Image (cartoon, helix red, strand yellow):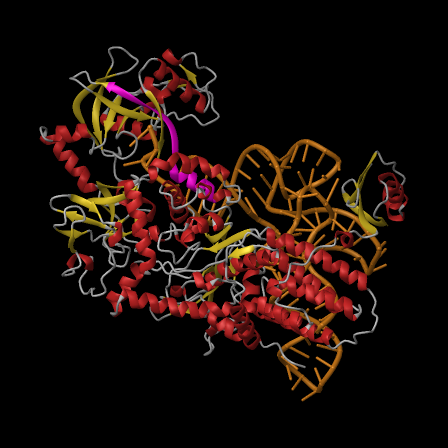
Amino acid sequence: MTRYTPAEIEARWQATWAKDEIFKAVRSADKPKYYVLEMFPYPSGRIHMGHVRNYTMGDVIARYKLATGHNVLHPMGWDAFGMPAENAAMAIGGHPKDWTYNNIKDMRDQMKPLGLSIDWSREFATCDVDYYGQQQALFLDFLKAGLVYRKNAQVNWDPIDMTVLANEQVIDGKGWRSGAEVERRELTQWFFKISDMAGDLKDALDGLDNWPAKVRLMQENWIGESRGIEIPFQRTDGDGTILCYSTRPDTMRGASFIAVSPDHPVAKTLETTHPDLAAFIDECRKMDTTEAAMEKAEKKGIDTGLRVAHPIYDGVELPVWIGNFVLMDYGTGAVFGCPAHDQRDLDFARKYVLPVQNAFHMPGDTAEVGTDALVPAKTETIVYIDHFAGITEATGQHGIDATIDYFEAHKLGTGQTKYRLRDWGLSRQRYWGCPIPVVHCDDCGVVPEKKENLPIELPYDVSFDVPGNPLDRHPTWRNCACPSCGKPAKRETDTMDTFVDSSWYFARFTSPHADTPTVQEDAAYWMNVDQYIGGIEHAILHLLYSRFFARAMEVTGHLPKSAHEPFNALFTQGMVTHEIYQTRDDKNRPVYHLPEDVTDGKLTDGTEVETIPSAKMSKSKKNVVDPINIISAYGADTARWFVLSDSPPERDVEWTASGAEAAFKHLTRIWTLCERISTMDKDAKGTGDTDLLRAMHMCIHDVTTGIESFGFNAAIAKLYGFTAVLQKSKAGHAAQREAIMTLAQLMSPMTPHLAEDVWTRQGGTGLIATTPWPQVDDAMLVSDTVTMPIQINGKRRAEITVPADMSKEEVEKVALADQAVVKSLDGASPKKVIVVPGRIVNVVV
RNA sequence: GCGGGCGUGGUGGAAUGGUAGACACACCAGACUUAAAAUCUGUUGGGCGUAUGCCCGUGGGGGUUCGAGUCCCCCCGCCCGCACCA
């Protein structure tokens, strides 16, 4: 009797797969292609359980697609630029490049024992000069196409990372990585013109049927489309107009002031001549240091003395104020305030004693606004007055649309659709990123580098002993010739946001070593990604940027039109969690303990630990289980099996030692079962062959459906069930052998090594990985008889077994004749009998 | 504040509108063993009953339906996203 020894089995099969190159993706017209991709990892140096779960899910899909006759592309790479490498260099010395490449090597070594069906020949890291050089080429093409531009702008400045952040990278007023309160600064920066595509990025979400609705909705909210109107207000104190944007033109009757941003041109002009206004504007600028403070800040304003005419009431004048709450970069930087129907405007009006005037009424309102603005709910009926009095049935959007029509018809304004989405600032004042390939020339200004001069390589000889960007203080790197006039010039020292790197890597995988960003035939063949798998945390940032890049690469001829939306299907998987174990030190501060140091709620010295409910595995809470330890204790197949079982893949899964143990026991059971069948008398006849094979076909059906619908946990439950059937079966050798070989095939996407071994031991030919997926024999799914529950008034009272093809009428007769039914009816006569063939009978009395 | 999701045994979770709790964990009992481990078998939503069985049960309340965990309305709780966006 041999034992299940995963270490030996797994190494052996991984070597075989590698030798036979069965996962190498080659273009072929013979089979349909299938591109499965998991979000590539940041090379932190160690893989964690989240990686194991993410890549196992992708691997199940990839292996299943391979077995179902697809030409599969399943690549792996490294999102390798970024701050941690520089932080490590600053903290412990060394060089970001060495740190990163060492980490990549370590993580690759940790990942390979998982037995993933990856085409490693396509591997690359975004910090490879081959990759970022092509990214520079893309940048130049985008620049030529007007998709990148430079502007002086208020930016989010992270004072800890000492760099700029995009709007998407500021979470609750704090930097997404450093957690520092973000400041506002004015800097000249490069921007991607993502806002030009806002409408399409929003509209195309509708077509992404195989994306989670949640992600589509988050993107829709982020893009923030709103329908409104731009209204020019005529100055009465002089010439000119002030253009205001409003999504509520139906409140125009109640307008009592205009508010402009402190950065508005009107404010900037007045600033030069009015010291009081200048002081206020100055105060606004000083106050605006952090996003968090801005949110809490008091609404303040100052009257400019300017006056404008009310657009629909002759002779009514409105004062123009500067308001600290008006944003310059949304709409037109100027709004009209309607205190009666907007809480913020009302607070402002009360503070500065401005008129409050109803624009409409709602049934039941007192027509007298106190401290709460009269804001109609979506479904409430609004009764308009004066100019809009005709719009009586107005609810929700109707009144707004109708008033926009009114303004347009009277040439008082223009309907406008606006977006919240801002352009993506990509400049970062960091070393470890892709250099922006432009040159600053005293004579020619900002000049794009020539393509033949690419790649602009990062210098290796840099120092991190002082804060700031080492490229700025490098003695020679900046020096270059102007690509336009040839005179000495200086390179741009900003590098690109690392989200740029991850916005097109999926396209690069289709021709990873080409000397152009993509190759037309390869991109056309392999794109789109058929199934993309990753964390919900990328719902906005990475996925929105990638959708923009696909469009931009289409415009610049690097991707086909068909790749407009690059990810056909998206799956967002849950996290791996673990309980947290803590004790307290003498100052009552928590001390955390690794799960491996805790047995039955106690440390090895007998100290009891407090158990805190399961949370995302994190080093700081020490609630981590190292995949390497699990693999060496139980093997990769056990780890893979466990992360897929118990919880649906979109939800979190809690790692438990007992669960991992159970997974290992099950795989051992399969091994033992395989041994038993191998040693059976080959000729002996058994009993129940048909029952076993019928259960087998049910299992094929259920597992196939499970995998195709991401119901991995359900598929695994069925595999448990069928294993139990096979274990108890008294069927003959041939049937049992067929059953275990099919079981191995069905398990092969999850536990590929064990599956190969069972397959070979049972005399299967070739590799299970490339053997066609088992087919369901539909005839085997239908049984001759069927057991149906009988309900009386919806309560289950009896059960009958009848031939599967029995007519409804016959079933009804049999049901009503049943002993238990007769007893339950107790002489009452049925009013109605509902027979759902093969399902249920309900007798209504 | 706005938008979305979720709520099922001791636990993780199953259930195309059709027998709620599959499968797994944990617990308990039994077999094997001198014993333990390992392995195998069985029980396990609550209540009543010797028992065939009966009653209750998917956060709470109402509704649609022959039939609701599932669909609709209201409420409660939790989670997530967005928010000075005019």
Q: Is residue A110 left or right of residue A487?
A: right
Q: In which image quadrant can residue A642 be found?
A: bottom right
The percent position of residue A140, horizontal first and vertical second, equals 28, 46
The quarter of the rendered structure image containing the C terminus of chain A is top right
Residue A337 counted in the magenta span: no
The quarter of the rendered structure image containing the N terminus of chain A is bottom right
Against A534, residue A688 (above or below) is: below
Against A550, residue A684 (above or below) is: below
The percent position of residue A596, horizontal first and vertical second, equals 47, 73
Q: Is residue A499 left or right of residue A724?
A: left
The percent position of residue A105, horizontal first and vertical second, equals 38, 69
Q: Which residues are magenta?
A: A215-233
**Front-lying residue, A103 or A237:** A103
The structure residue drawn at horizontal position 48% and vertical position 17%, both measured from the top left corner, is: A393
Residue A57 seen by the camera: yes
Against B28, residue A527 (above or below) is: above
The structure residue drawn at horizontal position 31% and vertical position 31%, both measured from the top left corner, is: A344
Q: Is residue A438 left or right of residue A506?
A: left
The structure residue drawn at horizontal position 15% and vertical position 37%, both measured from the top left corner, is: A282
**Front-lying residue, A499 or A312:** A499
Residue A625 seen by the camera: no
Residue A218 counted in the magenta span: yes
Q: How many marks?
A: 0
The percent position of residue A314, horizontal first and vertical second, equals 26, 10
